[in-house]
Amino acid sequence: MRSSLFHLVSLSPQHERVRHLHLQVVSEPEFRIALQTPINMRSCAHTGNRVFAVRAGLVKLSSLMGAFNRTFDALALAAIAVLVALAAARASEESVDQATKTALSLDAQLKHGRALFIAQCASCHGRTGYGDSSRSIPALAGQRFAYIVRQLANFSGDERENDTMHHVVARPNMRAAQSWADVAAYVSRMPMNPAAETGDGTFLSLGRGIFHEQCASCHQPDAGGDQDGLVPALKGQHYSYLLGQLRQLAAYRRHNVDEELLRFIQSLDEKEKQGVADYLSRQHEPGKNHQVLRQNGTLVD
Ligand code: HEC
Ligand code: HEC
């Protein structure tokens, strides 16, 4: 029996301690049976090793050795290792979902949201919420309220990777669910960026076709996102940010993400990603349901 060294890696930065496990390597179909959960087989770009990504990349098992050997013990051990890691990942997802629900159930205070935005967010995302493409900072203006809340919860629970935003949500006045609701309510009502950075137009018609065939069912034909708010608007957003997120999503760097979304995005090649990001970056009418915001943070219907 050959023994292979596996690295069991939780992709969440919080649990970055890598545990080394000695396991027999088993073949992919056997894993599938043992775990009764879909496993995406991918090659690790870094090492060229086989990577098992379970449930949308929350956990990956990567083999350091190429040889595959089938034994029942190995299967059992590997399954246990994966299940332990999955349980931790699921607990984290659940607490983020709970935090999102709590924040969404609160009465958002727009004035407080405005004050928070100016003090905590404007230095990067801009006073107008238009973002800054040269610093890879997304536009937030006009983004869906519930989606913003959910992303703040995701950053806070390490379900989405980004050191900069991890620091922001760790600030004392940004930890409370009330702050997320307030600031999200404010930015969601800001008028969208009318002139986001665009791509160079090379794959634009390819991108338009893909968006309307594959993405509009969720993101809506006008790219304004879902009414219920958990699907983001993709318009009014910078090309390089959109392209960057398509790559991040495809590489499992955003956890707590629908598997169906991942399947769509992973099916796109580089040209298609560029095309769809370019097409979206040129869509920028404000959403129909957005009220007008006065300078003092109050609303006009
Ligand atoms: C120091 C710079 C910085 C500050 C301050 C900052 N952000 Fe961010 N923010 C970023 C960057 C960079 C990203 C892109 C993260 C990524 O690439 O995943 C981001 C991403 C986000 C996203 C995700 C957007 C999307 O479309 O998914 C939200 C929501 C967000 N920030 C909200 C806020 C709020 C609210 C504040 C203030 C409380 C804030 N940010 C303060 C730099 C900053
Ligand atoms: C099954 C519904 C669904 C489909 C189909 C779908 N998306 Fe999404 N998309 C979502 C949801 C939900 C999110 C938010 C994920 C999260 O909470 O982090 C999202 C997030 C995104 C983001 C990140 C936005 C940001 O501000 O960071 C991009 C970019 C994106 N989708 C592009 C696409 C493209 C391009 C397609 C088509 C190839 C597509 N989506 C198809 C539901 C979908």
Image (tube, rainbow, N blue to C red):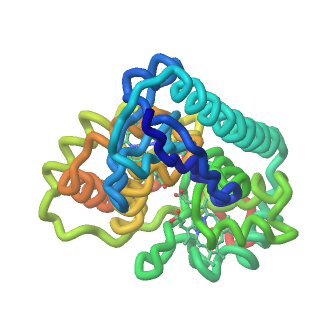
The residue at the point 57 percent across, 43 percent down is: 22
**Residue at the front extreme?**
1
Picture coordinates of residue 237, whole percent (x, y): 42, 62
Asked if 15 appears above or below 3 in the picture, the reply is below
Q: Is residue 68 left or right of residue 124?
A: left
Picture coordinates of residue 31, whole percent (x, y): 46, 25
* Quarter of image, ligand 2: top left
For the N terminus, the image quarter is: top left
Q: Quadrant of residue 123?
A: bottom right
Q: Is residue 290 visible to us here?
A: no
Q: Nearer the viewer, residue 79 or 215?
A: 79
The residue at the point 36 percent across, 53 percent down is: 44
The residue at the point 59 percent across, 79 percent down is: 124
Q: Nearer the viewer, residue 66 or 158?
A: 66
Asked if 253 appears above or below 244 in the picture, the reply is above
Give the mark count: 0
The residue at the point 41 percent across, 81 percent down is: 134
Asked if 62 appears above or below 226 in the picture, the reply is below
Picture coordinates of residue 283, whole percent (x, y): 33, 56
Asked if 297 appears above or below 224 in the picture, the reply is below
Picture coordinates of residue 297, whole percent (x, y): 74, 66
Q: Nearer the viewer, residue 172 or 106?
A: 172
Q: Is residue 70 left or right of residue 100?
A: left
Q: Nearer the viewer, residue 204 or 52?
A: 52
Q: Is residue 121 visible to us here?
A: yes
Q: Quadrant of residue 163?
A: bottom right
